[in-house]
Amino acid sequence: MTMFQRFTIGLLTFSLAQSISVPTIAQTRPAPACKSSIAVAQFSPPTYSTHSVRGISLQQAEQRAEIAIEFLRANRPDRANQINENLRSRLELSASEIAVLRTIQNLEAGKIQAAIALFPELKRPEAHRRSLTLQLKKIPLQAKATWILQAVDYFPEPDEDEMNYQQQWNLPTLKAGWMLLLAEDYRTQGNVTEAVKILDQARMLLNWNNNAEALQFVEAYRKAGQSEKARSILTSIAAQLLRNVEPQPVRPRAIQNLIKAGHELALMKQSSEALPLLNQAETLIKSIDRSNVKSLQQSLILAYAAAGQTAQSLQIVQTLDSRDARESYISLAKQAAELGDSRSAQQFLQSIRDQWIASRTSLDVVKIFADAELLSVAYNIATSIADSQMRLEALATIVKRADQAKQSALSAQIIAEMQQVKTGEVSGFQRLDTIRALIQVGERTHARSLLAELTRQPDLAWLNLQIAEQYAAIGEFDQATQLIDQQRTRRVQSQLSPLPVSIVAPPLDLLNEPPFTPLGVFFSNVLLDVNLPQRAPDTRSLQRRVTPIPSIQSKQSKKPRTVQPPKLPPTSRLSPEESRALDEARYIRAYAQARNFTKASNLLAQIPDHLCLFKAELFDNIAIAALEAGQLEIAIGNFQQAKRLSQRANRVRSERIDRFIAIAKLYSERNQTTEAIRLLEATLALLSNR
């Protein structure tokens, strides 16, 4: 990086910090008020509670902890410790809780040895099993193996008093769970030998009095192809499973274990042994409180189907309400596909009444059959999918698998079918949808060939922007820019009317963490005592008094995440200035996707600032594209401009803090720690002033 670039970054990050602390000086000529007649769709980040403890919300606590992670990644553990000490003081965290927080942070930052060095301070890791397990799931396999194996060796067996707590919370169960997680990772990455080795080690930790835990090992061994070892565990706990359902009233957990045992036997082709257990479970379900029945019935439905008793399975489904029945059909279809039973899979799919959900489930089933190289079965299901976009994605998935299996004739046939135009449809749009589906599943070679065909057809030149978008998606940015230039030239020459504005959502995996993160779960636990084991009264002298903070609420829905185009007023209500802004927005986004940030910025400079939120969102679009391209200086500058305009409209969006943290992470990964530290300090200053 040149001296000039370093100076620019320093200036940008300095201005970020100063933008909050320096009062705005009155202008002789006040800036025009923001206009709200046009605005782009806003993307919804995860929802956080606005309640606070000692002036800090759950979201702010997470963001500070994330900044500490990036300081660790930038080799500044001293600054990370200062942030953590501030959190400890404000939230009244115990030494053990701080040790859990620091463990999560060091694991995320890749500082595995530092995380291991914290073992002596982790007094009761089982109390934070969920946050620690979520974090272990995120890190690479080798780092995970290093930490878990040493943790299992380090932590002692609990004393007698500890064993009196609920079984699901004791330390041996936690350690066994970590080993099962590690074994599953090895298995899914194709190293079954190492997975079995880990399972054999973990088996020594097995609590034979905990049937649920033993059944987890049965499932793990079965998936690893070790049916004999799975059966030996089942044999060992069989008598205990039956004893546990004798006391009255019977516990739902005991029935669940009975169903699980029968299900595992059925999946190991031992239906004759499975059915007595399942029949007994069905009888017992009738004797318990109705509030506990639904989950047991769902499990029993799958187990009966796996044992070949479809009639009994469907008989139970018919007793459920429509929503629960639909969920059962979804699970049944996927299980049938995993078992290679195409006839049953299609039967269950046809029983799903909701068209979109049926299409979504059919797509999942197609992927299962395609992965098993049952391509003809996958094809038959794919062609019956009602939703056109999911049908194309399903067919594209089969094309990819056919190419991998050297079945080029089949892939060519399917691609031709994907491009067939139905009555009333536009040829260019259908072909673009086909290209998008191929790109989505990673079939870039076919996509590139089809794009070349489109560009050779003059009658489809009006689709140049959409074609450019797909070229950008496969990394051919020069070709994309050329097509955008051509479209702008045609627009000027022929005064083309604007097409609908295309809005591209920011990448969720880059900018928005999932609703339940390790840090989110940690702070919920320590502030609310959520999901902690029931213990004797805490003898700590410091008693925490907090305002309840709900956990982060998931906004997941059954429908896919979609971004609606802006709701525009009638054209007659738009001023010429606003009409031009809407038209230029298409090209700004297109150039940003094509990574021609100079042309995007030049066009954006022509849009007046008083279209505040509209222009702020366009700055965001450029920044997100620059972030994906690794152009961090451009990303910072555009995020800062978006923040400036949002402040002017009194609409500061909190997720921009997360974006600055993401940029700092990328700096550290490039070994540009000086730039990372500057940005983190500025971001921390911005957060401290909120």
Image: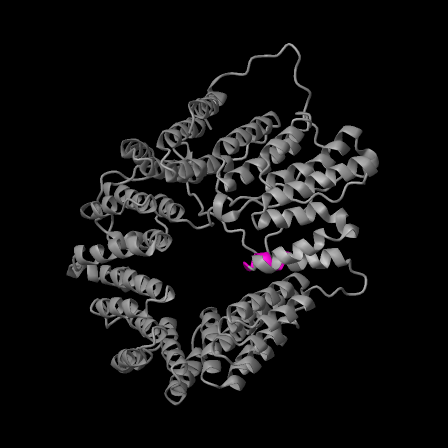
Residue 354, given in percent of the width and then of the height, sits at 65, 67
Left or right, 210 with respect to 345, comes to: left
Residue 211, given in percent of the width and then of the height, sits at 30, 73
Q: Nearer the viewer, residue 393 or 431?
A: 431
**Residue that appears at 28% across and 44% down:** 111
Q: Nearer the viewer, residue 501 or 156?
A: 501
Question: Which quadrant, please, contains the N terminus?
Answer: top left
Measured along the vertical axis of the image, is residue 296 above or below residue 567? below
Q: Is 440 a magenta residue?
A: yes
Residue 406, given in percent of the width and then of the height, sits at 53, 71
Q: Is 412 a magenta residue?
A: no
Measured along the vertical axis of the image, is residue 75 above or below residue 141? above
Q: Residue furthest front?
A: 456
Q: Is residue 256 visible?
A: yes
Q: Is residue 351 visible?
A: no
Left or right, 316 with respect to 72, comes to: right
Q: Residue furthest top?
A: 28
**Residue that appears at 73% across and 56% down:** 429
**Residue that appears at 68% across and 63% down:** 388
**Residue that appears at 54% across and 58% down:** 442
Left or right, 86 with respect to 316, comes to: left
Image quarter of residue 82: top left
Q: Nearer the viewer, residue 402 or 389?
A: 402
Start-end of magenta stretch? 436-442
Q: Residue furthest bottom?
A: 272
Main SS class of the magenta portion in the image: helix
Residue 185, given in percent of the width and then of the height, sits at 35, 62
